[in-house]
Amino acid sequence: MPEIKENSDSEKVPTIEEIDDSIIKVVFVISKATWKKLGEIALDRETSRSDLVREAIKQYIEKLEKPEEQNPKIPDRALNKILKECTKADGGFEIDGEDGFVAKMKAKGYKLKDLTPQQWERVKEKLQIGLDGYLFKPSLEEFAEKFEDLEPSEEQYEWLSTDTSEESEESEEE
């Protein structure tokens, strides 16, 4: 029978084993630096290292179980190929024209809204390079309109129509 611990009010507090009899003990090895960092985070959150590890594992498993994360609508390999093909030899990024990002995405039937958050971050970096490389920069509204056929999400459209170069400069200065 599982051990029952009593608190100061003499109420019985069930052990973890009583709550879930399918719990198993797991032993693994981590670096001292990670152990120390876990301790600092645990103190800040007023919890235990074990709770942090359990929470992290649970979140990781939930992330893996999300179908859109496991099977993105746009395969990473295909997106990486498009990004590579649109990257110029001088480091620029081609957005317009028949060899540009918009045309290549449209030809494949890909939509911006179908990008995973990680894919969108990679695309944003390239689009920023492309925007900064225009000889005659379009207005932000014109820039965002270039992507309408690719059906960006509201958040993506907002990013496309917002001056992001100031954010980039601020983060470089920090």
Image (cartoon, rainbow, N blue to C red):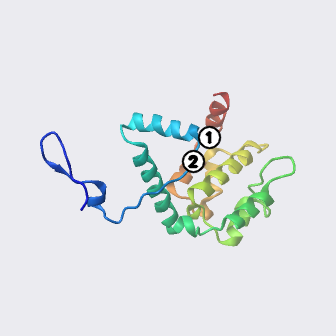
- Going 62% across and 45% down the picture, which residue do you hit? 140
Instruction: Look at the numbered disc 1 and give the secondary structure of its residue.
Output: loop
- Which one is nearer the viewer's eye here, 69 or 164? 69
- Going 61% across and 36% down the picture, which residue do you hit? 167
User: What residue is pinned by disc 2?
Assistant: 159
Q: Are marks 1 and 2 in contact (CB under 8 Å)?
A: yes
Mark identifier at residue 164: 1
- Which one is nearer the viewer's eye here, 83 or 109? 83
The relative height of residue 99 versus residue 163 in the rendered view (above or below) is below
Residue 96 lies left or right of residue 118; in this view the side is: right
Type of amino acid at the residue the image marks with label 1: Thr
Residue 7 lies left or right of residue 163; in this view the side is: left
Residue that extends furthest to the front in the rendered view of this protein: 1
- Going 18% across and 43% down the picture, which residue do you hit? 7
- Which one is nearer the viewer's eye here, 76 or 7? 7
Q: How many other residues sit within 10 Å of disc 1, few (<14), some (14-19) or many (≥20)?
A: some
The location of residue 37, given as percent across then percent down, is 52, 37
The relative height of residue 168 versus residue 89 in the rendered view (above or below) is above
